[in-house]
Amino acid sequence: MKKTAVVTAGTAGIGLETALGLAAAGFAVTVVGRNADRGARAVDRINATSPAHPARFLPADLASLDEVRALAHRIAGDHAASGEPLTVLVNNVGAMFADRRDLGGVEASFVVNHLSPYLLTELLLPTLTAGAPSRIVNVTSGAVGVAKRVFDGVEPPGGYYGFHWYGRAKLANLAYTLDLAARLDGTGVSVFAADPGGAATDMTNGTLTDPKIVSPALRLLWPLVRRRFERSTSGPASVAARPSIVAATDGALTGRTGIVIGAQARPVAPFRAATDPRVAEAVRRLGEQHAPLAAA
């Protein structure tokens, strides 16, 4: 049976390296991204490796929940028409913003880092279940450690600090990932989180130089913290992609679920706050409220 995989934000950086790894493992890979030229280059690079199945590109702006819905409809329709299973979904999309932005009236970091992958996953669950055994891989981040752990709304009160807001959105997604794993246990759909650790990417290059992305309490120490972070993010994206590739392909994970694959491409304990059922319940409510499965 043909194995298929979808990688969001798969046209460059960690996403492209993940797509290359999945293609090398025998998957027919679909990469998703905003830019058609980058998409074409990504497909050319994957196909230049002579994979078992040619890659393809699907355009979608994953910051738009309407486009996420259209993407899910397209993917589900394609698999229904071909009869091929959807074997792996890698939600690699992520973004950090130096200044507060709105996307459809919702804070942008929460949209891109949680609501978008949440919505795509939920809409594709029937397709993934029909294709079981299948896997969902959500890319997380060590930034969850600096997150506010209050989820009464998509955005906590107070000033906007991009690094903390990014970590909070990633924490929401990690809590969702572990909650989803429990919900799908026994269905044949396994759910994993993958922490890429540090890598120099378009997201980190330049963004971390702005001290406004952290709270005043951390700002005086930020030059030191940033230098340490940048040293740890100097590795290649190909190394940072390994946790996602392992989560998607490792036979030792067959039948297992709810596991975080750490930066060394081995299972690690999840961040404790993400295992709190109160956090999971609050995050679930926010998803249902701000990213309903049917468009309004």
Image (tube, rainbow, N blue to C red):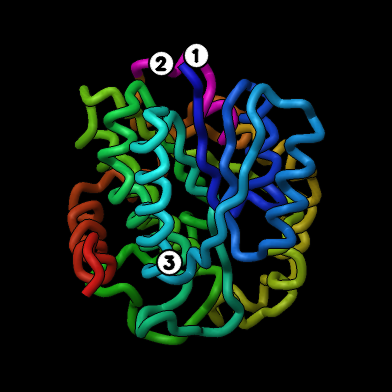
Badge 1 crowding class, 10 Å Cα cut-off, few under 14, some 14 to 19, many 20 or more, is: few
- Tell me residue 58's x, y (percent): 56, 53
- Label 3 and label 1: CA atoms lie apart by 33 Å
Residue in the foreground of this view, choosing between 166 and 93: 93
Q: Main secondary structure of the magenta part?
A: helix
User: Where are the magenta residues, as a range?
Assistant: 244-255
Label 2 or label 3, whichever comes before in sequence order: 3
Residue in the foreground of this view, choosing between 151 and 238: 238
Q: Do the residues labelled 1 and 2 touch (CB within 8 Å)?
A: yes
- Which residue is at a point 79% across and 53% down the rendered structure image? 231
Q: Which amino acid does label 2 sit on?
A: Thr
Q: What residue type is labelled 1?
A: Gly
Q: Are marks 2 and 3 in contact (CB under 8 Å)?
A: no
- Label 2 and label 3: CA atoms lie apart by 32 Å
Label 3 or label 1, whichever comes before in sequence order: 3
- Which residue is at a point 39% across and 85% down the rendered structure image? 158
- Tell me residue 110's x, y (percent): 41, 68
On screen, residue 193 above or below 283:
above
On screen, residue 28 above or below 255:
below
Residue that numbered label 1 is attached to: 251
Q: Nearer the viewer, mark 3 or mark 1?
A: 3
Report if residue 288 is visible in the image: yes
Q: Which amino acid does label 3 sit on?
A: Glu
Q: Residue furthest top?
A: 252
On screen, residue 59 above or below 128:
below
- Which residue is at a point 37% across and 29% down the rendered structure image? 83
In what element is the residue under mark 2? loop
Residue that numbered label 3 is attached to: 67
Q: Quadrant of residue 177?
A: top left
Q: In which quarter of the image is residue 222?
A: bottom right
